[in-house]
Image (tube, rainbow, N blue to C red):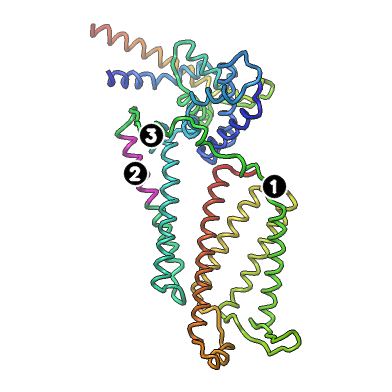
Amino acid sequence: MENVEKLKQELRRGIIVVAVMSRLQDFQYGYAMLKDLNDRGFEIGQDTLYPLLRRLEEQQMLESEWRTDDARPRRYYRLNSTGREALELLKAEWNELIKVIRRITNEAE
Amino acid sequence: MKLNKSASELLERYMLGVKRALPARQREDIAREIESSILDRVEERFPKTEEIGEKELKAALEELGSPYKLAGQFSPQRYLIGPQFFHIYTFVLRIVVLVVLGALLLSIIIGALTGNRWGAGFPFWEYLGTLWNGAFMAAAFVTLVFAIMERVNTGKEIEELKELEQFKVENLPELSDMKKGPSRAESIIEIVFGVLGLAFFTYLLNNNGAFPIYVNPAEKLGQVRIFTDNFLRFVPAMMALAGLDIARSATLLAQDRHSSLTNWWHILSQIGHMILTGLLLGAFPLIALDWMKDFAMTSGWDFAAIENGANLGLKVILALAIVGSVVEIIKWTIRELSNPAK
């Protein structure tokens, strides 16, 4: 079963970026995003989310700003135009993959 | 929601530990985000508590684990040593390199003192090279071990390392050192001694290393030389370093706090002191007691033994000064890199 868990992790690893980027159409801060994704059934830890946010920002797909009007200063993230374009392409790729995988698995059955 | 005094202090100590484990680039930015996320977590856990105490904060921090662990989770991903081990890797690396450096330094000093290698042929740069090689080899070995662990143990928990990931209040760094400003008395004493040192060195240069000798205040016997030309040629460098130290103490007095400028100033000054002391060790004899010859002969004393003893005493003092400088350089560099002053 340990190997199956490993395979499941590998499967999820590729789509985490789609899930995170999809929740960044509007400004969101890290902890709220973590809660939001987990509440929606997509399990993700802070050790995955925060390094990913930094990487996306380095790749200039995100913009971030510190807001001090909340109870405490929080860093908010949002996709910029490059990020939105990338997300559309990733979503199209994801839909295509689903179709292909369905076809392959149905043929196998 | 707000934190009471003891909870604020606990959070400050935890964040100090987090900052020490973060990469220098982005340290402040990531630390700020971590602190914000910790408070979000506390608020979510205790939604009805207006004032959070130490007990509540401790419960939240226990869930998050040690500052090293949390810092590793928020840091940018590394590829040779992954996030699972990176925070432990940096922790072990620092300890191993410091221990190896300390042991090498001690063995060099003992070897040099017992083998009588201080003196004209003192291989200062060779010893510095030995220290650098030792630190490099230790770092390479630790990196190799962790890289192998990374490849072999991906996804598995290692019991021995879990201990380091747990949150324990007693493992958090203390705030006192960081909060304490510079001591005014210490700065004033440093300035006074610096000025006295400058006056002494100026006197030495003007008198070619000679001092007047009196039997009583009214009867001057003449001038005697104590320091050799080998010593005198380093005096201008000593005066320059003393001047820099005085200027740093005056800056600390004026700004009444440690800043990045004064901290790096101290580190560079200590490097200067270390190099100068090393060069002095290579320039022995520094003390000449020719003026005692006649007196020693009439008294039946062994003149050569007295002169050698004086030079050996100076060698030991200089060797200790080098150790002191190395300790200061390591201590202040680690402190400044892990928690830079503003």
Q: Are marks 1 and 2 in contact (CB under 8 Å)?
A: no
Q: Find disc 3 in the rendering and name its residue.
A: B161
Q: Is residue B41 left or right of residue A17?
A: right
Q: Residues within 10 Å of mark 3 (few under 14, many from 20)?
A: few
Which is nearer the eye, B17 or B6? Answer: B6
> Magenta segment range?
B138-151
Q: Dot 3 falls on which chain?
A: B
- Type of amino acid under label 3: Leu
The mark nearer the N terminus, 3 or 2, is: 2
Give the chain of mark 2: B
- The quarter holding residue A95 reads top left
Judge from the rendering whether residue B161 lies leftward or rightward of residue B197; answer left or right: left
Q: Is residue A101 magenta?
A: no
Q: Which residue is mark 1?
A: B257
Q: Looking at the image, do the residues carrying marks 3 and 1 touch, with CB atoms under 8 Å apart? A: no
As drawn, is B336 to the left or to the right of A14?
right
What amino acid is found at the position of numbered circle 2 in the picture?
Leu
Residue A96 location (% of width, % of height): 38, 13
CB within 8 Å, label 3 to label 2:
no
Q: CA distance from mark 3 to mark 1?
A: 38 Å
Of labels 1 and 2, the one closer to you: 1
Q: Nearer the viewer, residue A102 or B89?
A: B89
The numbered dot on residue B144 is: 2
Q: Residues within 10 Å of mark 1 (few under 14, many from 20)?
A: some
Residue at (44, 60) in percent of width and height: B105
Badge 3 or badge 1: first in the primary sequence: 3
Q: Residue at x 41, y 40 (%)?
A: B89
